[in-house]
């Protein structure tokens, strides 16, 4: 301010204007009572069509080593106690959207484990202390190496160690833990309380240290965030009437930073899978009349640039999910209505049919490293 006043004085002196006598100076104007004009909303464009890829027809042939998800055969599978396994490929469970006429033979919410050899195992919920009934809202997650499983219901949270078939229960004061995700080293779980007023996680979420059982609040919203191997976490925030969407980076122990995503975006669910080179999330307009279609969106997290979008098939609720990155280029996408899996080569814009389900309405959680070795042939796990 001082420099600005000095420059103003120099300008007046050079102009030769006479000094103004204080007694002859005009009276100050009364303060304005007018309401300032509000800044108009910033116009935002829809996600660009030229970056959009459409999901192929379900009649596209399956690729080599594609996964067959047959929950009808899983219903008759032995339990882990009866036939132990060292690791799993994926967890699958029937959801409430299933229209399969034979779904009565399956228990909604009952998780089933598929091994890398294509064999099914049942998880004995009663043995783990969940009670006599299966939960339609059971939360389930499998670790990247396929050796650990986490299950959560209103009655508690359990982790299962597959190689020795041991388990541990956690009596958490969060009501029902949802949005479960393993950290890369499987030492902790990310989670959120279904009812955000429950403490100690608050409205955003927690990490559960599996060694100590301690819950620690996180500064980002677990439903809209996703971790990276190096400890950074990215949170996607939707656009508003006055501003664009954001990608907020939370470095370990550092100050968060953010970049803009210059389009109308409405992130849905837990933000997406563990970040590889890019991050992925599901764009899901809240209004059914919205012009933007539901899509899987890939964003470069340090610049906010949209890399590509995958168009959803017409659906009342949206049906595609960003399941997991199998490499920096390959994203596994699941269709929770049909149960199909798609392998998306994002830079090349190519989609391959990587899995099929014999039952409609299936939720799938994939062991990232195990699936990458199966579908990509060779895979080097990230350092750390």
Image (cartoon, rainbow, N blue to C red):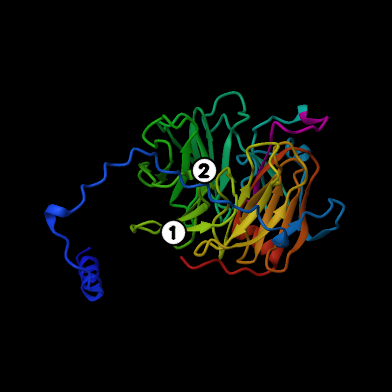
In magenta stretch: residue 89: yes
Say what secondary structure mark 2 lies in.
Answer: helix
Query: Looking at the image, can residue 48 be seen?
Result: yes
How many C-alpha atoms fall within 10 Å of the one at disc 1: few (<14), some, or many (≥20)?
some
Q: Nearer the viewer, residue 322 or 384?
A: 322
Q: Identify whether 97 is placed above or below 22.
A: above
| Residue under the point 69% across and 53% down | 333
How many C-alpha atoms fall within 10 Å of the one at disc 2: few (<14), some, or many (≥20)?
many
| Residue under the point 39% across and 35% down | 202
Residue 66: give x, y in percent of width and height: 77, 57
Q: Nearer the viewer, residue 133 or 180?
A: 180
| Dot placed on the residue nearer the N-terminal end, 2 or 1 | 2
According to the picture, the residue beneath numbered tag 2 turns out to be 223
According to the picture, the residue beneath numbered tag 1 turns out to be 232
Indicate the quadrant where residue 232 lies.
bottom left
Residue 319: give x, y in percent of width and height: 71, 43
Indicate the quadrant where residue 33 lies.
top left
Magenta residues, as a range? 88-103
Residue 195: give x, y in percent of width and height: 47, 30
């Amino acid at each position: 301010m001082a420099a600005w006043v000095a420059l103003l004085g120099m300008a007046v002196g050079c102009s030769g204007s006479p000094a103004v006598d204080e007694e002859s100076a005009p009276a100050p104007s009364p303060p304005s009572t007018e309401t300032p004009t509000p800044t108009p909303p910033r116009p935002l464009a829809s996600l660009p069509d030229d970056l959009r890829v459409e999901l192929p027809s379900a009649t596209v042939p399956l690729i080599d080593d594609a996964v067959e998800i047959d929950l009808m055969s899983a219903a008759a599978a032995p339990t882990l106690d009866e036939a132990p396994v060292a690791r799993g490929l994926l967890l699958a469970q029937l959801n409430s959207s299933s229209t399969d006429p034979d779904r009565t033979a399956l228990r909604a919410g009952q998780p089933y484990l598929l091994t890398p050899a294509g064999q099914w195992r049942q998880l004995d919920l009663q043995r783990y202390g969940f009670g006599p009934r299966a939960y339609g809202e059971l939360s389930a997650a499998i670790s990247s190496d396929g050796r650990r499983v986490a299950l959560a219901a209103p009655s508690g949270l359990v982790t299962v160690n597959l190689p020795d078939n041991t388990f541990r229960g956690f009596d958490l004061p969060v009501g029902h833990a949802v949005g479960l995700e393993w950290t890369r080293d499987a030492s902790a779980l990310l989670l959120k309380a279904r009812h955000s007023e429950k403490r100690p996680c608050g409205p955003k979420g927690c990490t559960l240290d599996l060694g100590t059982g301690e819950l620690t609040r996180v500064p980002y919203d677990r439903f809209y965030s996703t971790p990276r191997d190096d400890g950074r976490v990215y949170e996607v925030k939707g656009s508003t009437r006055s501003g664009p969407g954001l990608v907020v980076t939370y470095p370990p122990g550092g100050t968060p930073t953010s970049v803009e995503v210059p389009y109308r975006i409405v992130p849905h669910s837990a933000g997406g899978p563990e970040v590889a080179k890019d991050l992925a999330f599901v764009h899901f307009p809240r209004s059914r009349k919205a012009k933007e279609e539901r899509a899987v969106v890939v964003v470069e997290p340090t610049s906010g640039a949209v890399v590509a979008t995958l168009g959803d098939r017409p659906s009342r609720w949206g049906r595609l999910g960003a399941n997991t990155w199998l490499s920096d280029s390959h994203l596994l996408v699941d269709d929770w209505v049909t149960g199909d899996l798609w392998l998306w080569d994002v830079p090349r814009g190519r989609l391959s049919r990587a899995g099929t389900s014999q039952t409609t309405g299936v939720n799938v959680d994939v062991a990232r490293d195990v699936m990458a070795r199966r579908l990509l042939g060779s895979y080097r796990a990230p350092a750390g």
